[in-house]
Amino acid sequence: MIGFNLARLLGFVTLVCVSAWQPVPAALRSAAHTCSRTAVVDMKGRGSRGMPGKATGYRERDNEGMKKRMQKRDFDKKEWVQVVSSIDEEMGTEPGATKAVTAGITPRGQDFIWCLIRGNPAVPEGGDQVEEKVFAVDGSCRCCQFPMSAGKLGSEPDGSYSFECGLCGTKYSLDNGEVLEFLPKKNPAQWAAALPNESKGPQKTVVLPARVSKAGKVYLRLPDGTLLNPL
């Protein structure tokens, strides 16, 4: 009798356990599986690790390096022509000193004449040492054709350099050759120069890149394709 009752009790417990169990829906299993996974972190490079200005510093160094490489490649071009062997001996040491030089040849075989103008020594952008500064412009004034070697160096309110013709007084920017002042007529000589030239209107002068080596040699950068020797 006791064995019979024990068997009935075990059967009852088994029935209750089976009734209580229900399969978990597939949607819930999928959600639970998804939640148990760790989210993938999207790593997009090292970045600047939260340091302000660090990425900008990298870009500036890269740009400066590229600029120097391009400058070096340009310096190797044949259009860079030496025109002075010693800037101090051939031009003088004072800012504003000038010298007429020839570089390049026209298709007709005539020499191009340029005027060198000595500026104030300065530290170039991105550099750390003072370098000599030289400008190179047309050999004659584009307005009155007077030699530019007789002109006068000046400075503008924005700190840039200008150069004034020694006869007609027309003033040119040494940054881009633009006319800053056209035939000012400030004295009798300028009045006389203006009479036959005023109708021409302002004409910008040519400004060539120029550089001075550590040995004091001056080089001009002629436009690409300029003839260097007679045909």
Image (tube, rainbow, N blue to C red):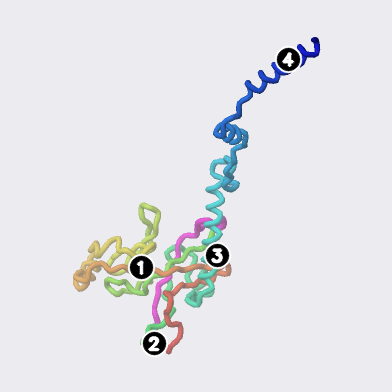
User: Could you tell which of marks 1 and 2 lies nearer the N-terminus?
Assistant: 2
Query: Element type at marker 4?
Result: helix
Q: Position of residue 101 (x, y in %)?
A: 43, 77
> Marks 1 and 3: in contact by CB < 8 Å?
no
Lateral position of residue 174 relative to residue 61, left or right? left
Query: Element type at marker 3?
Result: helix
**Residue holding disc 3:** 69
User: Could you tell which of marks 2 and 3 lies nearer the N-terminus?
Assistant: 3
Which circle, 4 or 2, is nearer the viewer?
4
Where, by quadrant of the figure, is residue 13 drawn? top right
Q: CA distance from mark 1 to mark 2?
A: 27 Å
Q: CA distance from mark 1 to mark 4?
A: 126 Å
Q: Residues within 10 Å of mark 1 (few under 14, many from 20)?
A: many
Specify the amino acid type for callout 2: Gly
Specify the amino acid type for callout 3: Arg
User: Could you tell which of marks 4 and 2 lies nearer the N-terminus?
Assistant: 4
**Residue holding disc 4:** 8
Quick one: 207 or 195, which is closer to the camera? 207
Q: Is residue 102 visible?
A: no
Q: Is residue 223 magenta?
A: no
Look at 50% across and 56% down and name the residue there: 125
Specify the amino acid type for callout 4: Arg
| Span colored in magenta | 111-129
Look at 44% across and 74% down and name the residue there: 222
Lateral position of residue 200 relative to residue 39, left or right? left
**Residue holding disc 2:** 109
Q: Position of residue 150 (x, y in %)?
A: 36, 70
**Residue holding disc 1:** 151
